[in-house]
Amino acid sequence: MAARGRPRNFDKDKILAKAMRLFWEKGFEGASMADLTATMGIGSPSLYAAFGSKERLFREAIELYNATDGAAVWQETLAATSAYGAVEAFLMTSALQFSTLDKPSGCFITLATLHSTPASAVLATEVSARRVRNLELLAEKLAQGVASGEIDGKVNIDALARFFLTVQQGMSIQARDGASHQVLEQIARSALTAWNSLTTVG
């Protein structure tokens, strides 16, 4: 009979949450294995036994972020009853989430793989695909505004969605550079003043 391995003496969910925050703060490349094991409070053998690799740990951290800290923005956006309300929720909720003091600033999905290397190119592509999906979600919400007559049918919905997503991604970088909640809200409000001109043709 094969010998049983030593039981884990840690809570996998709790140490994954710690890894998520470190990746969120430093990015995939910036978070070294030494940083991860120190933050998670486990040795390298335990990390590999629980997660398989740094790359798999990162993927699980991304999934955790999407299910927890990253979920609020899309919950508010998709629940909005108008296209304008969706964009307002998208930007204003982002302003709040990006500047919450007890969390790393900015958006994990926006910032985590900006400084990729050939070794992390696959992960960077996967995260980029998530950003593309975010663009699609926002465009789908805006398309509902066309269907309801809120947005002119001649408006380029993809370009409109890209504009507001770019504003949100810029807010993420501003937050990482120390912008406060108030400053991020001002950016969001400024972008929203363009709504009428961007959604009306002729």
Image (cartoon, rainbow, N blue to C red):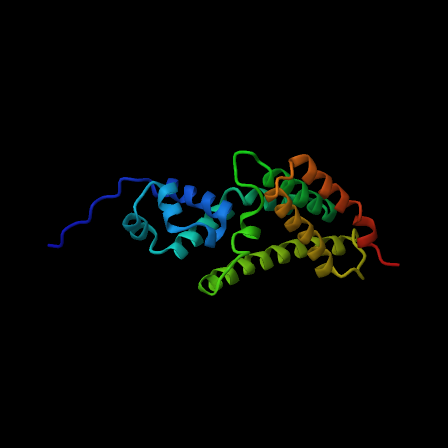
- In percent of width and height, residue 201 lies at 85, 58
Viewer-proximal residue among 159 and 154:
159
Q: Which corner quadrant holds the C terminus?
A: bottom right
Viewer-proximal residue among 152 and 33:
33
Position of 72 relative to 49 (above/below): above
- In percent of width and height, residue 95 lies at 65, 40
Q: Quadrant of residue 7?
A: top left
Q: How many marks?
A: 0
Could you tell me which residue is drawn at 47 percent across and 60 percent down?
A: 123
Could you tell me which residue is drawn at 45 percent across and 44 percent down?
A: 22
Could you tell me which residue is drawn at 30 percent across and 46 percent down?
A: 43
Could you tell me which residue is drawn at 60 percent across and 55 percent down?
A: 134
Viewer-proximal residue among 138 and 44:
44
- In percent of width and height, residue 78 lies at 63, 47
Q: Is residue 17 left or right of residue 142?
A: left
As drawn, the residue found furthest toward the bottom would be 118
Q: Quadrant of residue 71?
A: top right
Viewer-proximal residue among 82 and 21:
21
Q: Which corner quadrant holds the N terminus?
A: bottom left
As drawn, the residue found furthest toward the right would be 202
Position of 101 relative to 85 (above/below): above
Q: Is residue 100 left or right of residue 195?
A: left
- In percent of width and height, residue 79 lies at 64, 44
Q: Quadrant of residue 135?
A: bottom right
Position of 173 relative to 102 (above/below): below
